[in-house]
Image (cartoon, rainbow, N blue to C red):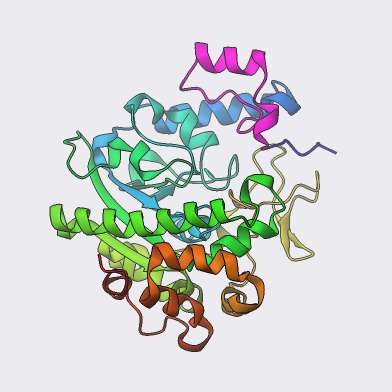
Amino acid sequence: MQAEYSRQKKYSNTFPVRLLWKLFPHAYISPRFDPLFTDGITHRYLLKNYYAWKMFSAFDPKQALHVGVFSDARGGSHLVESQFHYMRPVFSFSEGFSPSPTGNLNYRAFLLRGTFGVNSLQDKEARDLTHLVYNLNSKPDAEHPFWNPELKAPLNRFWLYNYRNPLRVLHSMAKTGKNKWALTEETAESVSRSFMQRLSMMRRTQDAFPDRVDSLIFEKFVQTPHDEVSRLALSFGVGKEQIANRVTAESFFKAFFRCGSVPKNIDGYLTSPKSGERIKGWGGGFNPIAKIDSSRAFMPSVANVIPENIRSVVESVLGPELMELMMTDGEHLFSNVTTEDLMRYGHI
């Protein structure tokens, strides 16, 4: 059986990999993206690269609308973005990828950097693509000048802002067990300020380009995912027919990149009967065929899992009105709350 290839950064932080990245900056030669490091140069690997080159080498970035999604890590944006990927004219990329410089957007990007890694391409073709979606979680907003609304750029752009209750973001971070996301006052301040800065940045982009901005509240998305995804796709110009013809994850994934086997539903995952590999989304390894459980978005009560000192830090950044809204999310479920309300309560 084939070994699972690793997506961990530590396996990419070696001298040979860094040298290859330096020599071929747009080839994404890294154990984090490319199974070349575990499988070697196989016949199937070469065929897949040839297919991607044939389908995407002539792709013109100017023919698409480029949708940048701003969110927090553990904010649920990977799950949101994956839903657009099932629309034929949309391709969603994993985090840490930007079309600037435009050399980044080559056939290897479509082959390796999609929201489902090497299994993202499936039957997508350049001639069908009208929208490209980018996850911009991995760097602060200020480090994304390509998406700055005041900057003139050669590509058509759209900005999508995703908001999740920062108290729940902190809880989700802490549950990962990663030291960098420990439930500390420093982390609480960072997450809270990121939330407020994103609201402020949304206001600026709305003022500059009112027809090129939209947003969602993650807790509202998980309650009505189909409605929210359809609304947003329509907002950034995907046709009604393409939205209506969005396929399910089960029908989208036709074959595994590495072994060519047809996915089977085994223990609730799309699994290769040949290698045992499972199809998972980028960012936490979420299961694309699992039903979105809205109850998880509001459990447990934030009052029971966020210590008082952490809440004090968050409130000092959000202010009392916005903090009250976050503390009582289990009561209102954000049902009638809009992002305009978030701005108003946060005095932005």
Residue at the image point whose x is 53% and y is 26% from the top? 28
The residue located at (37%, 36%) in the rendering is 143
- Asked whether 66 or 39 is in front, the reply is 66
The residue positioned farthest toward the bottom in the image shown: 331
Question: In terms of depth relative to the viewer, which is nearer, 262 or 315?
Answer: 315
Question: For the point 66% across and 72% down, which residue is it?
Answer: 305
- In the rendered image, residue 56, in percent from the top left (x then y), is placed at 41, 32
Toward which corner of the image does residue 203 lie, by quadrant?
A: bottom left
Check if residue 283 falls in the magenta segment: no
Residue under the image location 45 percent in, 40 percent down? 139
Q: Quadrant of residue 172?
A: bottom right
Residue 244 in view: no
Nearest the eye: 106 or 151 = 151
Residue interval drawn in magenta: 8-34
Q: Considering only vertical position in the picture, is 42 above or below 302?
A: above
Give the percent coordinates (x, y) of residue 16.
66, 13
The residue sitting at the right extreme is 1
Residue 243, placed above or below residue 119: below
Q: Is residue 154 left or right of residue 170?
A: left
Horizontal side of residue 133 vs 145, given as left or right = right
Question: Which one is nearer the viewer's eye here, 230 or 247?
Answer: 230
* Image quarter of the N terminus: top right
Q: Residue 45 in the image: state x and y as whole percent.
A: 64, 28
Quadrant where the image shows the C terminus: bottom left
Q: Is residue 210 above or below residue 307?
A: above
In the displayed structure, does residue 157 sit left or right of residue 327? left
Measured from the top left, where is residue 334 in percent x and y? 42, 80
24 magenta-colored: yes
